[in-house]
Amino acid sequence: MSYEKVNQAKKTVIGTKQTVKAIHGGHVVEILVARDADNRITQPAIQLAEEKGVKIDFVESKIELGKACGLQVGAAVVAITV
């Protein structure tokens, strides 16, 4: 279900650093976080999203999340932006 959100989104931001920047910029509607990603990588985006009231959705696989973004590698965090 959540992987489909990424496919259908017109604009996405991939990666923790870029997601954090986009949240600070106020452009993020929702973030998707892979459960199998390392917590030290995902935690900054999760914490900031919670502080800013951005919806957080968890998916099972960073490989599948990466594929949903059109990547051949995994993605720990993806932001859906406006």
Image (tube, grey):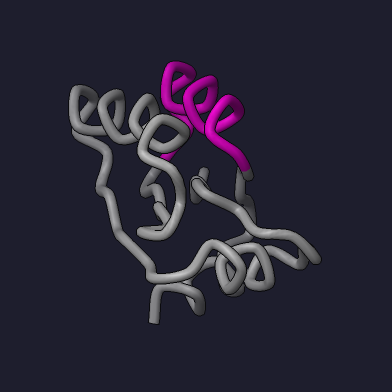
Estimate the x, y position of residue 76 in percent, counting from the top left. 52, 49
Q: Which residues are magenta?
A: 15-28
Q: Is residue 60 left or right of residue 78?
A: left
Estimate the x, y position of residue 53 in percent, counting from the top left. 19, 33
Estimate the x, y position of residue 22 in percent, counting from the top left. 52, 27
Q: Residue 35 occupies which quadrant of the picture?
A: bottom left
Q: Is residue 82 visible?
A: no
Relative vertical location of residue 81 with respect to residue 27 in this rendering, above or below: below
- Give me the residue at 74% from left, 60% from top: 73
Estimate the x, y position of residue 24 in percent, counting from the top left. 43, 17
Decide whether the magenta segment is chiefly helix, strand or loop: helix
Q: Is residue 48 left or right of residue 28?
A: left
Q: Quadrant of the N terminus?
A: bottom left
Q: Is residue 71 left or right of residue 5?
A: right
In reply to whether residue 69 is colored magenta, the answer given is no
Relative vertical location of residue 34 with respect to residue 19 in this rendering, above or below: below
Q: Is residue 46 left or right of residue 19?
A: left
Relative vertical location of residue 1 with respect to residue 8 in this rendering, above or below: below
- Give me the residue at 61% from left, 68% from top: 63
